[in-house]
Image (cartoon, rainbow, N blue to C red):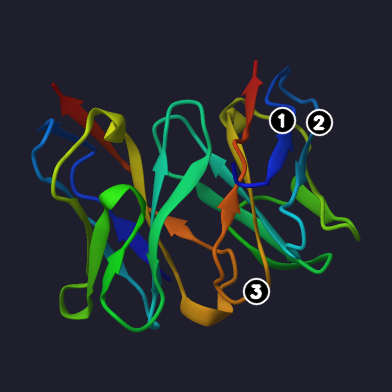
């Protein structure tokens, strides 16, 4: 139990649609990051938010966007879904922005058909 | 840029045998290094991490790893495998203190434990 909760756990979307995934960080954690894990691969960093501002981004197009709220919960939004967006999306939180222990949620499985 | 290579996408050992999962990294700055475990249909659980100090790091469930700068390696070991160790293992690197949660992961190694 990491204290990081994600919703929904599973969802199916159609190509071209939009999706919003949600994450509730461990209490007091002000840094949240999102990762995409395709089947059979390691997670890939999408972006990170620290105190409600994006402060790091991986190699993902702008149709991947996010928000962090004052209570440090977070959303990942993906527009114009493509079949290759099918993956497990992992949220991770930590206290601060200096390499403290990072806790992962159990992820949201997205299938795009 | 940083990268992580995990040698062997699948490793099979007998119960009670030594577990050795290999990880090599590249980083332009002194790295922070991590091993995570992922059980089927679950998220990632931290096994251990190296930031600074002692190069031999002990983690949960009897696992340990040694940071070898000269070899750019951070191999994971466990003296005696248990059936419950069967899972996917990921090595990850971050660029030290300024990197926050920005981890670069290897492709993973699936550990199978035979009775």
Measured in 3D between alpha carbons, the distance from the residue under mark 2 to the one under mark 3, in whole angstroms, is 30 Å
Measured in 3D between alpha carbons, the distance from the residue under mark 1 to the one under mark 3, in whole angstroms, is 30 Å
Mark in the foreground, 2 or 3: 3
Circle 1 is placed at which residue position?
A81
Per the image, label 2 sits on a secondary structure element best described as: loop
Chain ID of residue with mark 2: A
Which comes before the other along the chain, label 1 or label 2?
A: 2
- Residue A77 lies in what quarter of the image? top right
Which comes before the other along the chain, label 2 or label 3?
A: 2
Per the image, label 1 sits on a secondary structure element best described as: loop
Mark 3 packing: few (<14 Cα in 10 Å), some, or many (20+)?
many
Circle 3 is placed at which residue position?
A97
Q: Are marks 1 and 2 on the same chain?
A: yes
Which comes before the other along the chain, label 1 or label 3?
A: 1
Chain ID of residue with mark 1: A
Tell me, for residue A18, which label it has, or none: 2
Mark 2 packing: few (<14 Cα in 10 Å), some, or many (20+)?
some
């Amino acid at each position: 139990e990491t204290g990081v909760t994600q919703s929904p756990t599973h969802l199916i979307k159609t190509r071209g649609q939009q999706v919003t995934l949600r994450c509730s960080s461990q209490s007091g954690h002000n840094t949240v990051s999102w990762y995409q894990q395709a089947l059979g691969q390691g997670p890939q960093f999408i972006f990170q938010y620290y105190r409600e501002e994006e402060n790091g981004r991986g190699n993902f197009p702008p149709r991947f966007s996010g928000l962090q709220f004052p209570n440090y919960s977070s959303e990942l939004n993906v527009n114009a879904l493509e079949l290759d967006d099918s993956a497990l999306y992992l949220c991770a939180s930590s206290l601060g922005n200096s390499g403290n222990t990072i806790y992962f949620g159990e992820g949201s499985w997205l299938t795009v058909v | 840029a940083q990268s992580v290579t995990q040698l062997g996408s699948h490793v099979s050992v007998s119960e009670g045998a030594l577990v050795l999962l290999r990880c090599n990294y590249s980083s332009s700055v002194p790295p922070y290094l991590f091993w995570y475990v992922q059980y089927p249909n679950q998220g990632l659980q931290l096994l251990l991490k190296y930031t600074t100090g002692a190069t031999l790091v002990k983690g949960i469930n009897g696992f340990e790893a040694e940071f070898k700068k000269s070899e750019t390696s951070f191999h994971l070991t466990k003296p005696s495998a248990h059936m419950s160790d069967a899972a996917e293992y990921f090595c990850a690197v971050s660029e030290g203190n300024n990197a926050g949660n920005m981890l670069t992961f290897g492709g993973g190694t699936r550990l199978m434990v035979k009775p």
